[in-house]
Image (cartoon, helix red, strand yellow):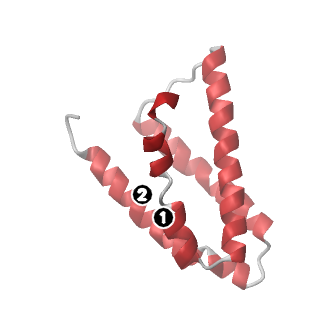
């Protein structure tokens, strides 16, 4: 690690997710359907993803393993988001997000997967 740019990205992510977690209940409370909240979230991720891919000078890989892993990651991420929105409908954000933020424990607990 030549720079500490990763730390800036990690802290910025934490701040953005904190604000997002605090504000995500507002549309549902105002009567905006949860399904549309998910659609809006997904669409707003497109520009963010393009910026992130531009920063790392991304190149598309076409081999079978890359396609499979991309599909798995996408499905797990989308499924996790759907479950998160359901959890937010059923419980308060101030309880849901501290529990959800423990997700790195899963990564650290199963190092043999990678």
Would you call the spot at circle 2 few (<14 residues within 10 Å), some (14-19), or many (20 or more)?
Answer: few
Asked where in the image residue 84 lies, by quadrant, the reply is bottom right
Which residue, given by chain and number where applicable, does mark 1 sit on?
17
Q: Give the number of marks.
A: 2
- Disc number at residue 13? 2
In this view, 51 is above or below 96: above
Name the residue located 22 percent from the left edge and 45 percent from the top edge: 4
The residue lying toward the viewer, choosing from 52 and 87, is 87
Name the residue located 61 percent from the left edge and 48 percent from the top edge: 46
Asked where in the image residue 30 lies, by quadrant, the reply is bottom right
Name the residue located 77 percent from the left edge and 77 percent from the top edge: 32
Image-based side of 96 in relation to 76, left or right: left
Name the residue located 45 percent from the left edge and 64 percent from the top edge: 16
* Residue 57 in view in this figure: yes
* Residue at the far bottom in the pictured view: 30
* Residue 114 in view in this figure: no
Tag 1's secondary structure? helix
Tag 2's secondary structure? helix
């Amino acid at each position: 690690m030549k720079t500490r740019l990763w730390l800036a990205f990690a802290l910025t992510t934490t701040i953005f997710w904190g604000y997002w977690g605090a504000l995500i209940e507002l549309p549902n409370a105002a009567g905006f359907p949860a399904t549309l909240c998910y659609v809006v979230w997904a669409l707003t991720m497109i520009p963010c993803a393009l910026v992130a891919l531009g920063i790392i000078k991304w190149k598309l890989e076409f081999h079978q393993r890359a396609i499979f892993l991309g599909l798995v990651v996408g499905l797990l991420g989308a499924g996790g988001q759907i479950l998160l929105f359901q959890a937010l409908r059923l419980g308060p954000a101030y309880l849901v997000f501290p529990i959800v933020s423990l997700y790195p424990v899963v990564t650290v607990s199963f190092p043999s997967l990678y």
